[in-house]
Amino acid sequence: MPDMKESLTHALPQNVTAVIRRPVLTDAAGIHQLVIESGALDGNSCYLYLLLCRDFSATCRVAELDGHIVGFVSAYHPPGRPGTLFIWQIAVKQTHRGRGLALRLLLDLLAGVAEGSALVIETTITPSNLASQRLFASLARRLRCNLRMEQGFDANLFAPRTHASEKKFLIGPVALSLERSA
């Protein structure tokens, strides 16, 4: 398994000046607006983002630039699977895309996960969301980990709403260690 610190050292894009940090309650409205404006993510209530900021801040990150939320990633450890980090939503403001900010959000999030554990990164992506597919392929390359795809959620599970099927993307295992071998 690749060493996380070594992977992060070689992976952080240097051209992004946004501050990456854990979200706080006052970020919820800005996160909600960002997700709605993304056009690609399922819009949830602002209440959900309040819960994420309060109860899941350890596994979420925001990117802030000039006092505005320009990026967001939410994740959690599924119950019964502490060695898995499920990346639920990731969004970058339209005007800030293509600068490595989404990758930087993910890498910062991974750097904050408990040291000394092995982790598998999991997400689901619709076949039409090529940007997310490229992002997670890039993350796997940067971390020097395998990326595999499996069946995710079938379209009929989203009924009565129309929603495309989602493929499950799995990256890892990633070694989360702050020690570097000589």
Image (spheres, grey):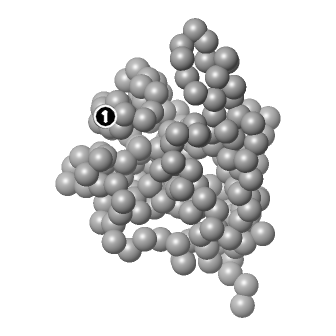
Estimate how packed mark 1 is, as few (under 14), some (14 to 19) or many (20 or more) residues with alpha carbons within 10 Å: some
Q: Furthest-top residue in view? A: 160
Q: Position of residue 54 (x, y in %)?
A: 46, 33
Numbered label tally: 1
> Residue sitting at 56 percent across and 63 percent down?
138
Q: Position of residue 57 (x, y in %)?
A: 49, 41
Using the rendered view, name the quadrant where residue 5 is placed. Answer: bottom right
> Residue sitting at 61 percent across and 73 percent down?
7
Where does the C terminus fall, quadrant-wise?
bottom right
Residue 77 showing in the rendered view: no
Q: Is residue 28 left or right of residue 68?
A: right
> Residue sitting at 41 percent across and 53 percent down?
21
Pick whichever, 134 or 60, lies toward us: 134
Q: Position of residue 88 (x, y in %)?
A: 56, 38
Where does the N terminus fall, quadrant-wise?
bottom right
Q: Position of residue 14 (x, y in %)?
A: 38, 74
- From this view, report whether residue 34 is shown above or below residue 177: above
> Residue sitting at 68 percent across and 47 percent down?
169
Residue at image mark 1: 37
Q: Is residue 16 left or right of residue 81?
A: left
Q: Secondary structure at mark 1?
A: helix
| Amino acid type shown at disc 1 | Glu
Residue 62 showing in the rendered view: yes
Q: Is residue 116 left or right of residue 158?
A: right
Using the rendered view, name the quadrant where residue 166 is placed. Answer: top right
Pick whichever, 46 or 51, lies toward us: 46
- From this view, report whether residue 4 is shown above or below residue 36: below
